[in-house]
């Protein structure tokens, strides 16, 4: 399973990248707004900076919702850097645009996915990545990880090439469960990635080893 970081914060991107396990970055308009990035030029420049920091796929989301506008916006985003993946919402014009991008060699990430039916449509349209939002599904009292399992099963028996990118991750356990459920990629906040490191027995064991090591010096 590939690891993406889900943020537009450059310090967090650098920290995750320095771990040596980072395969890419996802952003969305809310994450860009959180960093105070404002205006088309600043947004484009921020994506370029991220592409220069991380050698991997970088999702940049369109804010247009009409087919022609999505295509024009997506083309501009894709021109920023070869690693840009155009993130397109799961709406009717979004599906049409994903098909257009797929036919024209531009990679896409279909976002705001909450059902297996949506996952089938995105795969048929040729999406490179599919982003089911598992945390938001959990928040609405459904099982987000179960959706990853269902989509993984469908894609496997149907031979769809679209990669399942588990999004809206809330904690380290989500990452483990998504790996078990067959996600190809997990995009995670830095805290959830670092949460994978934690186990009290590791801390206790290390303290003991370091204490005993003093006897050997
Ligand atoms: C990433 O691609 C998604 O936009 C993001 O994971 C959504 O996460 P949230 O539900 O925490 O906002």
Image (cartoon, rainbow, N blue to C red):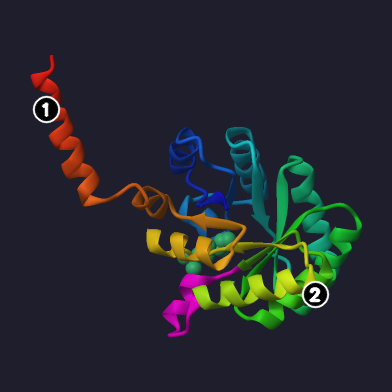
Does the magenta run of residues contain 136? yes
Nearer to the camera, 131 or 154: 154
Between marks 1 and 2 in the image, the one whose residue lies nearer the viewer: 1
Residue at 78%, 67% in the rendered image: 160
Q: Nearer the viewer, residue 82 or 34?
A: 82
Q: Is residue 61 above or below residue 81?
A: below
Q: Is residue 44 visible?
A: yes
Question: Quadrant of the rendered structure where residue 80 is?
Answer: top right
Residue 158 placement (x, y as % from top left): 78, 73
| Residue at the image position 64 percent from the left and 47 percent from the top | 58
Label of residue 93 in the image: 2
Q: Is residue 94 visible from the viewing direction of this image? A: no
| Residue plotted at (39% across, 58% down) | 172
* Dots 1, 2 in contact, CB < 8 A: no
Q: Which residue is mark 1?
A: 212
Residue at 37% in and 48% down: 194
Highlighted range, magenta: 132-144
Is label 2's Cβ within 8 Å of ligand 1? Answer: no
Label 2: state its secondary structure. Answer: helix
How far across and how far down the image is residue 51, in percent?
64, 38
Q: Where is residue 119, by image quadrant?
A: bottom right
Q: Residue furthest front?
A: 216
Badge 1: few (under 14), some or many (20 or more) residues near its Cα, within 10 Å? few
Occupied quadrant, residue 22: top right
Q: Which label was assigned to residue 152?
A: none
Does 195 appear in magenta?
no
Q: Please state, as top left, top right, bottom left or bottom right, where the C terminus lies in the image.
A: top left
């Amino acid at each position: 399973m590939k690891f993406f970081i889900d943020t537009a914060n450059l310090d967090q991107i650098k920290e995750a990248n320095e771990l040596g396990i980072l395969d890419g970055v996802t952003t969305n308009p809310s994450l860009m707004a959180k960093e105070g990035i404002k205006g088309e030029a600043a947004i484009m420049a921020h994506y370029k900076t991220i592409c220069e920091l991380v050698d991997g796929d970088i999702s940049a989301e369109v804010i247009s919702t009409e087919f022609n506008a999505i295509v024009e916006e997506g083309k501009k985003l894709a021109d920023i850097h070869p690693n840009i993946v155009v993130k397109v919402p799961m709406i009717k014009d979004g599906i049409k645009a994903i098909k257009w991008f797929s036919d024209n060699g531009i990679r896409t990430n279909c976002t705001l996915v909450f059902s297996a039916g949506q996952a089938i449509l995105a795969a048929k349209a040729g999406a490179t990545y599919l982003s089911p939002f598992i945390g938001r599904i959990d928040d609405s009292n459904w099982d987000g990880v179960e959706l990853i399992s269902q989509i993984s099963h469908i894609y496997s028996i149907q031979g769809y090439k679209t990669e399942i990118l588990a999004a809206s991750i809330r904690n380290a356990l989500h990452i483990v469960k998504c790996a078990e459920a067959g996600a190809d990629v997990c995009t995670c906040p830095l805290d959830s990635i670092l949460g994978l490191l934690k186990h009290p027995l590791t801390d206790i064991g290390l303290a003991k080893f370091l204490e005993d090591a003093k006897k050997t010096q």
